[in-house]
Amino acid sequence: MKIFRIRLDVLPQTAGNSYIEGENTRAEKSMADKLKDVALDRVQVKKAVQALQAFLKTKSSSDSQLLDESQNITLLFTLWKIPKKAQTIRIPLSHGFRSNTDEVCLFTRDEPNMTPDQTQRFYKKLLAERGVKNITEVIPFKTLKTEYKPFEAKRRLLGNFDMFLSDDRIRRMLPSHIGKHFYERKKEPRTVNLQSKKLALDIHRIIQGTSISITNKGCCCMTRVGHSGMTADEITENIESVVATIVTKLTMKGPLIKLIHLKSQSSVALPIYNSKLSQQQLVEEGRKQAKTKPSQQKPDKKVTVNETSDATTEKDDEIPQLVPIVTPSKRVKLEKPAKKRLEKAPKSTGEKTSVKGKGKITEKAAKNLTHKVKRKTPKS
């Protein structure tokens, strides 16, 4: 008996390669379709940015011009439906809106066999060797737990820095130590991989980029795209990159974005995108299918009908109609039934029935019994 062995490394891998290529082409087609559905008109977007900048110039006071204060410009997205899962999307921007004077704080993990001061010096040296110059302060996790434990210290830390970064190895332990105020002011720490080979590039993308948090509690979300001190072309390019990134990374099926508005802190929202009516029809069809699905899944009850008793089974299959019970306002007096008296049976001539006994005794026997019973008289 001969045994044949087949070497798998010699066989051609055309089937696997073709399957992977097919999946990649499908993904590219779906992304291209999504981008076509949300197609922005660059001319209209630029006009909206210029109109917003002109409005902000008229509203700005002399004090704000001397201090060179600029207002944030944000994009407001309205989705077709509420997402099932929450999602945070990081968006790299072609033109960063943070200045070099912004102060950035980095939370790091505690290195083994090192004190907090030694850990701080270790990471400052690491950042200097990698060419990172945007971070102004490094705080180890042990220092955060001890020195910034009081509520006032946390509020002071929140106000001293414009942005916070954290080591990805301690991101799960931070929420219980920094408090809710970081999340309310949208200054939650963004995670960084400090073991990355391209650490300077990663930190620069995070600092000069933006992010959007999509929750499963509503259909509206907002992200920052620039400030009023930037040019109209720079803000327009940032808007295009933000929309393209959100459309490709948003994990939802069907039509995604319904409306897009551009606004600032003190202005009215200007519409720059409105979805087509065809997308609305697709959404309505999807809702109708979702409603009809549970009714289709329930199996119909099988009804067996005999040939001899067709009429009786049809009556049984009919759904009985519910009749409401009417309660009377006043209670109806019920008539007492008349007592029926039993007719006395005719007495027999020589016999009389006894109540206690089962047998029948004659009148003579009853008299004899009464004579035989003697009364006991007390002795004097």
Image (cartoon, grey):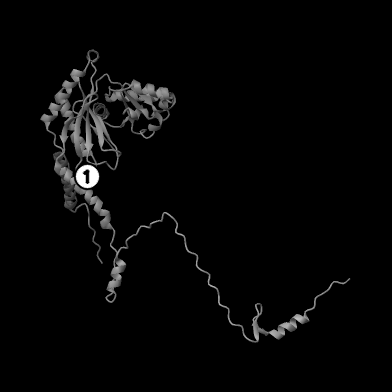
Specify the farthest residue to the right: 380
| Quarter of the image where one finds residue 57 | top left
Q: Which residue is mark 1?
A: 253
Q: Position of residue 241 (x, y in %)?
A: 18, 32
Q: Compared with residue 157, is residue 84 higher up or lower down, i.e. above or below?
A: below
Q: Is residue 94 left or right of residue 366?
A: left
Task: Determine whether the residue tagged by mark 1 lies in a helix, strand or loop.
Answer: loop
Quarter of the rendering occupied by the C terminus: bottom right
Identify the image quadrant of residue 73: top left
In the image: residue 314, left or right of residue 244: right
101 or 127: nearer the viewer: 101
Label 1: how many residues lie within 10 Å, few (<14), some (14-19) or many (20+)? Answer: few
Q: Is residue 187 left or right of residue 233?
A: right
Which is nearer the eye, 255 or 234? 255
233 relative to 120 in the view: left or right: left
- Residue at 80% x, 78% y is 374
Picture residue at 28% right of the left edge, 22% below the top: 134
Amino acid at pointer 1:
Lys
Q: Is residue 101 visible?
A: yes
